[in-house]
Image (cartoon, grey):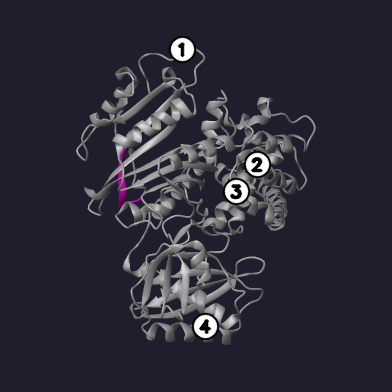
């Protein structure tokens, strides 16, 4: 089964069961300051798990683009990926476990034709926060899953979320598929790696508050997740995800760059996986408007591209190679399935951005080589800490550092190097965890004000600079807003002053902010603006600032917003900068 077939079957199954398909959100959260990328289908939907009605109903399904960066160092094995697609369906206060579990069973055994003999499940074993989930186990037994194939596991295994300190969360039940060549054992051992998780039903019914206690939500919700890459591999009998049609055309393109490189040769397998994975992730991230940089999402993108180039060097590829690989990734979208035609439409820019980063990095590697030679000449060796500093600062591959030392009959103290690397990893994890200190979505009073302010800024820019202005990105924290937009040149100081004056005049005018739900076509007909490049569902929420008959601003958005512009206070534009070719970025702060 191909990825395209799997995705089509999944979506169609849930549509037949009363769900409405919603498009994949951008990889870049539009107004979520707590995370750099969308890493699960639930992220854009969190407000609706708390009781807020979704504009198109209570039963939803989609294929969501995801990026997870926490395990970048794991990429290179058979199953880890930076960019992946997640199949998901949701019940927002509608059905719960008694309906979801039979649907899961039906999809696996009838739609995908997986034999009952190859399935096992896990349930929550219970603790002080929630009881043992015998109810879920009983449902599985009614569906003919033997009790010996049901394992009860603790919170570390069978509890989802919240990813931050606060937020919606709950127990889950996970489904496993037997990949062994022998018949599946009657007694399910979750530690046996031949049992591979294929699907996860999350039973969201709790909210973890700031005190660390769990409260019952106003409604029971369902959130499911099935990874496309892993499932396609399983259904085709592969223990290695990279052997599927999702990856092989990309890998073959890399193999053809240098004679003798073969995925089947163990010496090349891991580097080939990393190059394919990281450049595929980079292609989609650039496609969603991010450019390489030294901060946040731009830094992650830069790191992915540079890691790919480092592995290409290990493969012996010493020329600018990324354009050919990126083109093969874009060409391969049909094997993935889904509507990714925007990648083809934006092909030239995507290839150009990644190729330019490769050229820049190869120059950096030359500097790193010079630094190694300088340190060897000065110290007659290279300490583990110095080697790691070069590895981290210049992105210089460890293998190449060792080769340079070998030319001078020197060796590297790997223990020192690994200690420095581990210290850096722990510091990075601490910083990453800080992104989630407010929970998955920060809907505090101050970020709500900033959210409305971005709408006003968008409208003010269009009024003063022209209607060619379109939002191409934004980021909000509790301290400031950042707004990216299309514009060919730097704004003059007088333009910045005029925009700031306009914004504060709108705020003082005490315009009401109202919300309505209507068909997407009607939203566009009334002049509502949409986030550049986003594919919206058929029914959308539109937030209007000012009189409905002659609004100051009207945008498609999921909120939240203030009720009146006067609640914002005042705005100060603090600086502007380039956000890439033909794009500008403005930072602003609110004064209460």
Report which residue position mark 3 lands on. Answer: 339
Q: Name the side, left or right, on which 475 lies relative to 478.
A: right
Q: Label 1, label 4: how many angstroms apart (C-alpha)?
A: 70 Å
Disc marking residue 334: 2
Report which residue position mark 1 lands on. Answer: 183
Where does residue 514 sit, x and y in percent of width and height?
A: 37, 72
Where does residue 336 sit, x and y in percent of width and height?
A: 61, 40
Local packing at callout 3 (Cα closer than 10 Å; few below 14, some 14-19, many 20+) is few
Pair 1/2: label in front: 2
**Residue 586 or residue 302, whichever sits in front:** 586
Pair 1/3: label in front: 3
Q: Name the side, left or right, on which 293 lies relative to 515.
A: right
> Which comes sooner in the sequence, label 1 or label 3?
1
Report which residue position mark 4 lands on. Answer: 499
> Which comes sooner in the sequence, label 4 or label 3?
3
Magenta stretch, main secondary structure class: strand
Q: Label 1, label 2: how many angstroms apart (C-alpha)?
A: 35 Å
Q: Label 4, label 3: how many angstroms apart (C-alpha)?
A: 37 Å
Mark 4, secondary structure of its residue: helix
**Residue 106 or residue 238, whichever sits in front:** 106
Residue 452 location, quadrant: bottom left
Q: Is residue 191 visible?
A: no
Q: Label 3, label 2: how many angstroms apart (C-alpha)?
A: 9 Å
Q: Quadrant of the C terminus?
A: bottom left
Q: Please say if the residues under marks 4 and 3 sit with CB atoms less than 8 Å apart.
A: no
> Which comes sooner in the sequence, label 2 or label 4?
2
Pair 2/4: label in front: 2
> Which comes sooner in the sequence, label 1 or label 2?
1
Q: Magenta segment, which residues?
A: 164-171
Mark 3, secondary structure of its residue: loop
């Amino acid at each position: 089964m191909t990825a395209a077939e799997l995705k089509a079957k999944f979506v169609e199954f849930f549509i037949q069961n009363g769900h409405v398909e919603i498009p994949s959100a951008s990889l870049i959260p539009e107004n979520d300051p707590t995370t750099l990328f969308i890493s699960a289908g639930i992220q854009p939907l969190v407000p609706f798990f708390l009781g807020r009605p979704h504009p198109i109903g209570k039963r939803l399904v989609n294929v969501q683009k995801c990026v997870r960066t926490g395990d970048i160092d794991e990429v290179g094995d058979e199953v880890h990926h930076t960019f992946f697609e997640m199949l998901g369906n949701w019940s927002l206060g509608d059905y719960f476990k008694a309906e979801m579990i039979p649907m899961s069973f039906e999809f696996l055994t009838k739609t995908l034709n997986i034999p009952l003999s190859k399935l096992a499940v896990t349930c929550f074993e219970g603790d002080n926060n929630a009881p043992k989930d015998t109810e879920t186990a009983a449902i599985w037994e009614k569906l003919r899953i033997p009790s010996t194939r049901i394992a009860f596991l603790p919170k570390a295994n069978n509890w989802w979320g919240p990813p931050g300190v606060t937020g919606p969360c709950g127990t889950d039940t996970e489904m496993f598929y037997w990949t062994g060549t022998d018949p599946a054992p009657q007694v399910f051992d979750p530690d046996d790696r031949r049992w591979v998780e294929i699907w996860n039903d999350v039973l969201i019914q709790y909210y973890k508050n700031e005190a660390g206690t769990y409260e019952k939500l106003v409604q029971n919700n369902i959130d499911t997740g099935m990874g496309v890459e892993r499932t396609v591999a399983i259904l085709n009998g592969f223990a290695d995800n990279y052997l599927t049609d999702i990856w092989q055309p990309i890998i073959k393109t890399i193999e053809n760059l240098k004679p003798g490189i073969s995925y089947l040769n163990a010496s090349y397998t891991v580097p080939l996986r990393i190059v394919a994975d990281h450049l595929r992730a980079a292609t989609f991230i650039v496609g969603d408007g991010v450019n390489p940089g030294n901060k946040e999402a731009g830094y992650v993108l830069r790191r992915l591209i540079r890691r790919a180039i480092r592995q290409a060097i290990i493969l012996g590829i010493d020329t600018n190679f990324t354009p050919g690989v990126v083109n093969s990734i874009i060409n391969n979208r049909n094997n993935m399935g889904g509507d990714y035609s925007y990648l083809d439409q934006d092909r030239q820019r995507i290839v150009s951005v990644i190729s330019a980063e490769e050229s820049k990095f190869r120059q950096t590697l030359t500097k790193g080589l010079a630094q190694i030679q300088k340190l060897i000449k000065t110290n007659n060796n290279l300490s583990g800490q110095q080697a790691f500093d070069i590895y981290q600062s210049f992105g210089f591959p460890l293998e190449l550092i060792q080769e340079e030392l070998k030319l001078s009959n020197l060796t590297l103290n790997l223990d020192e190097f690994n200690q420095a690397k581990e210290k850096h990893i722990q510091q990075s994890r601490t910083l990453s965890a800080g992104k989630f200190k407010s929970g998955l979505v920060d809907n505090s009073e101050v970020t709500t004000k900033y959210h409305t302010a971005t709408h006003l800024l968008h409208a003010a820019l269009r009024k003063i600079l022209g209607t060619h202005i379109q939002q191409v990105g934004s980021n909000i924290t509790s301290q400031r807003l950042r707004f990216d937009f299309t514009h060919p040149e730097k704004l003059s100081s007088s333009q910045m002053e005029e925009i700031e004056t306009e914004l504060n005049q709108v705020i003082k005018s005490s315009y009401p902010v109202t919300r309505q739900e209507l068909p997407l076509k009607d939203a566009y007909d009334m002049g509502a603006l949409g986030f550049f490049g986003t594919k919206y569902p058929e029914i959308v929420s539109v937030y209007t600032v000012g009189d409905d008959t002659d609004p100051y601003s009207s945008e498609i958005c999921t909120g939240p917003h203030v009720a009146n512009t006067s609640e914002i206070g005042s705005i100060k534009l603090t600086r502007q900068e380039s956000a890439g070719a033909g794009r500008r970025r403005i930072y602003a702060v609110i004064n209460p």
